Image (cartoon, rainbow, N blue to C red):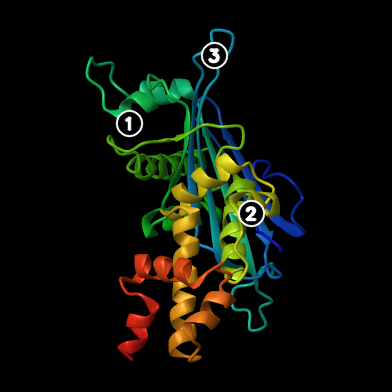
Amino acid sequence: MQTERLLNINYSDHAINGMDLLFKQERQMPDTVDVSIYRYDARDVAGNRPDHGLINYYNSSTPARQNKSLSLKFCLYGNRYCDKDCKRCSNRDECQTIDLFEFRFNPFFLKKMVPNTPEMSKREKILSFKYPKSFSKNIPVEDKKRTLLNSLLNFEGYGNSLDNILVHTKVNELLFYSMEALQEDQDDIPACPLSIEADFVNRLYDAKQILSENISTPLTIKELSKKVAMNECYLKKGFKDLFGTTIFEFYQKERMAHAKYLFYEKGLTVTEVSDLLGYSSISHFSTAFKKFTGLRPCELLLKQ
């Protein structure tokens, strides 16, 4: 199954999973932020996925490693691109793209933005690198962020040093909106070797699709983890964080929805549906069905 590379760790590759790099923009603003934008040809990529954002915060507590970093990454799907440089083109050869953005902030620059006061909010602690836990967190891409990202993607500017002022303003606004996602009472996703990077997110989507495609063939977590080549622990936690439900709950809802379809649309019996969904006994199926629908299969059929 072909998967797009969301929030890829190495954006500068000339191709991601067979996608051609159409162009890239890189801008370094010393002592403030580095900006990288990459656009890939996604015309052969099947299906659409929602836009994604990610905030990475790293604050090492190990004396030997004093690295500190904060970065934002975004992935936009479904933009259109034409490489013809013309104003009123009647024969545009457009292709769908995947647009990747990375903003790497200088820790010293961020610290200057926060007043040194005894009482700090979680966001202020993060910006001043006084928040002790490193983490990665998925953040939504609303219209206001998407507008800013597209303005950076299509930025023309004046061709001089003033361009940095404009870009810097837009990036700071992105940072402001992104920090809104960090609620005081919300748990963070612990930082791990995989983080919540491109491959990790894609494998979670693959796992979800595999479950949906195997309604009649129950899979264990171990089997599913092998199919998507992911550690079982990361798979379970990542699935819950990304989709808001456990793997078991999602799979059971899919199976029960399919069971109702088989009852209503196909007119199958309880025994036939139980067998098709891979249950070892009718009683096990009946118990699972009632848990998710509130009715036993026989009670549902009587209401038809």
Q: Secondary structure at mark 3?
A: loop
Nearer to me, 174 or 187: 187
Residue with the mark numbered 3: 66
Estimate the x, y position of residue 264 in percent, counting from the top left. Answer: 43, 88
Residue with the mark numbered 2: 224
Task: Check the picture and name the quadrant holding the C terminus.
Answer: bottom left
Estimate the x, y position of residue 188 in percent, counting from the top left. Answer: 40, 36
Q: CA distance from mark 3 to mark 1?
A: 20 Å
Q: CA distance from mark 3 to mark 2?
A: 38 Å
Mark 2: give few (<14), some (14-19) or many (20+) Cα within 10 Å.
Answer: many
Q: Residue at x 68, y 70 (%)?
A: 43
Q: Residue at x 37, y 82 (%)?
A: 298
Mark 1: give few (<14), some (14-19) or many (20+) Cα within 10 Å.
Answer: some
Q: Earlier in the sequence, mark 3 or mark 1?
A: 3
Estimate the x, y position of residue 56 in percent, counting from the top left. Answer: 50, 35
**What kind of residue is marked 3?**
Gln
**What kind of residue is marked 1?**
Arg
In the image, residue 276 sits, relative to residue 230, either above or below, namely below
Task: Check the picture and name the quadrant holding the N terminus.
Answer: bottom right
Q: Residue at x 75, y 59 (%)?
A: 20
Nearer to me, 258 or 288: 288
Residue with the mark numbered 1: 123
In the image, residue 19 sits, relative to residue 261, either above or below, namely above
Q: Earlier in the sequence, mark 2 or mark 1?
A: 1
Q: Earlier in the sequence, mark 3 or mark 2?
A: 3
Q: Tell me, for residue 291, which label it has, or none.
A: none
Q: Secondary structure at mark 2?
A: helix
Q: Is there a contact, CB below 8 Å, between mark 3 and mark 1?
A: no
Nearer to me, 117 or 235: 235
**What kind of residue is marked 2?**
Leu
Q: Secondary structure at mark 1?
A: helix
